[in-house]
Image (cartoon, helix red, strand yellow):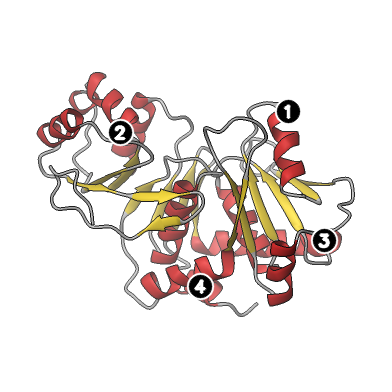
C-alpha cells in the first residue's frame, strides 16, 4: 500500500514507535500489524461505513485506528464507562460495526468484529466524506446533559495537517507520554503528532501519579501532556522527590483552567522544564498556540 503515512513509518522502521503494558514495538511491527488488520477488515467490511473502536490507547488500538483510516472508514473511538452511554454513542454516530480487542497477552490479542443493526441512511455529512473518499473521525462532547452530541471531523484532512507539519523532517528521538484518552481530541492529537514525527509513544497502564512518574523514569519520557488537575496531584504527592524525572524537557497542559499558583509551583519543582499551554475542543480540534513564557497563562 502506497501512502505517505506508510512511507513515513517505513523510513523509521527500526525506531521504537510505541511502548504499552504488553511491551515495546518498533515502526516495522506497527506496519505489520496495520497490514494484518487491513486484511481482516477486508474480509468483513467491504464498503465505506462507520465503525466504533472500543478501546483505550494501546499498540493494537492505534494500529487498528490507522488501518481504518487507510480504508477510509468513519472512525468512532469509544471508551466504555457504562452500557447506556455506549448504546447512546453507537446510536448517535450511526455505527454499523463494532471493533473490539480481546486478550491481554502480547501474542494473544484478537480482533472481534460485531455488526450493528442496519442504519437506514448514513447522515449527509458522513455521506459527503464517503463520496470524497475521505476517512472521518467522530468525537463526542463532554459535560453536557442528555444524549451525547457527536462531532464529525474529516480525518484525511486532519492527517494531512500533520504531514505538512512533521513529515520530511528528521525523526525526533524523543519519548512522549500518551496521557489523555483515546476518545479525546487531545489524546488523538498526541498520538498522531508522535507517529508522524517518528517519535516514541509511551502509554501508561493507568493514570495514577506514581505510575506516571515511574514510567517517566523508566522510559526517559521527554514530553508530558497532562491536565492541570493531574499536575497538581503530582505536586501534592511529591513524586519528583521519589522518582528521577530529569528526562522531562516539556510539560504541556490543557483541557481545563490552570491555576496560577499551580503553574508557579510546577516551575519551582521543574525549573529546567518548559511549560506550555495547549488549547483545543472536540468541535474544532487542536489550535496552534504560543505562550508568553513558562510562567505565564497568556496564550496567542
Q: Position of residue 60 (x, y in %)?
A: 61, 49
Mark closest to the chain's N terminus, 4 or 1:
4
- Which secondary structure lies at badge 3? loop
Mark closest to the chain's N terminus, 1 or 2:
1
Q: Residue furthest front?
A: 145
Query: Mark 2 and 3 residues: CB-CB less than 8 Å, in contact?
Result: no
- The residue at which mark 1 appears reads as 84
- The residue at which mark 4 appears reads as 10
Q: Position of residue 280 (x, y in %)?
A: 40, 51
Regarding residue 102, the answer to whether it shows in the image is no
Distance of label 4 from label 3 (alpha carbons): 26 Å
Mark closest to the chain's N terminus, 1 or 3:
3
Q: Is residue 237 above or below residue 58?
A: above
Q: Is residue 290 above or below residue 23?
A: below
- The residue at which mark 2 appears reads as 228
Query: Mark 1 and 2 residues: CB-CB less than 8 Å, in contact?
Result: no
Regarding residue 5, the answer to whether it shows in the image is yes
- The residue depicted at 37 percent of the width and 70 percent of the height is 166
Crowding at label 3, few (<14), some or many (≥20) Cα neighbours within 10 Å? some
Query: Mark 4 and 2 residues: CB-CB less than 8 Å, in contact?
Result: no
Crowding at label 1, few (<14), some or many (≥20) Cα neighbours within 10 Å? few
Circle nearer the viewer, 1 or 3:
1
- The residue at which mark 3 appears reads as 45
* Viewport quadrant of the N terminus: bottom right
Distance of label 1 from label 3 (alpha carbons): 26 Å
Amino acid at each position: 500500500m502506497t501512502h505517505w503515512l506508510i512511507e513515513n513509518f517505513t523510513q523509521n522502521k527500526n525506531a521504537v514507535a510505541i511502548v504499552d503494558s504488553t511491551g515495546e514495538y518498533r515502526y516495522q511491527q506497527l506496519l505489520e500489524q496495520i497490514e494484518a488488520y487491513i486484511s481482516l477488515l477486508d474480509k468483513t467490511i467491504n464498503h465505506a461505513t462507520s465503525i466504533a473502536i472500543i478501546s483505550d490507547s494501546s499498540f493494537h488500538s492505534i494500529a487498528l485506528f490507522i488501518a481504518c483510516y487507510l480504508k477510509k472508514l468513519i472512525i468512532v473511538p469509544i471508551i466504555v464507562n457504562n452500557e447506556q452511554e455506549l448504546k447512546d454513542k453507537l446510536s448517535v454516530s450511526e455505527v454499523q460495526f463494532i471493533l473490539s480487542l480481546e486478550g491481554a497477552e502480547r501474542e494473544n490479542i484478537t480482533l472481534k468484529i460485531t455488526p450493528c443493526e442496519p442504519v437506514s441512511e448514513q447522515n449527509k455529512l458522513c455521506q459527503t466524506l464517503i463520496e470524497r473518499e475521505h476517512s472521518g473521525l467522530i468525537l463526542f462532547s463532554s459535560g453536557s446533559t442528555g444524549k451525547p452530541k457527536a462531532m464529525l471531523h474529516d480525518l484525511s484532512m486532519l492527517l494531512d495537517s500533520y504531514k505538512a507539519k512533521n513529515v520530511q523532517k528528521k525523526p525526533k528521538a524523543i519519548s512522549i507520554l500518551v496521557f489523555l484518552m483515546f476518545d479525546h481530541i487531545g489524546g488523538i492529537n498526541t498520538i498522531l503528532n508522535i507517529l508522524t514525527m517518528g517519535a516514541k509513544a509511551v502509554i501508561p497502564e493507568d493514570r495514577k501519579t506514581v505510575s506516571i512518574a515511574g514510567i517517566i523514569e523508566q522510559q526517559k519520557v521527554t514530553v508530558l501532556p497532562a491536565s492541570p488537575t493531574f499536575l497538581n496531584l503530582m505536586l501534592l504527592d511529591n513524586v519528583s522527590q521519589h522518582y528521577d524525572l530529569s528526562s522531562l524537557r516539556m510539560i504541556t497542559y490543557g483541557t481545563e483552567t490552570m491555576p496560577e499558583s499551580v503553574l508557579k509551583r510546577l516551575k519551582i519543582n521543574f525549573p529546567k522544564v518548559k511549560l506550555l499551554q495547549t488549547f483545543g475542543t472536540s468541535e474544532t480540534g487542536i489550535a496552534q498556540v504560543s505562550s508568553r513564557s513558562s510562567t505565564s497563562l497568556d496564550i496567542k
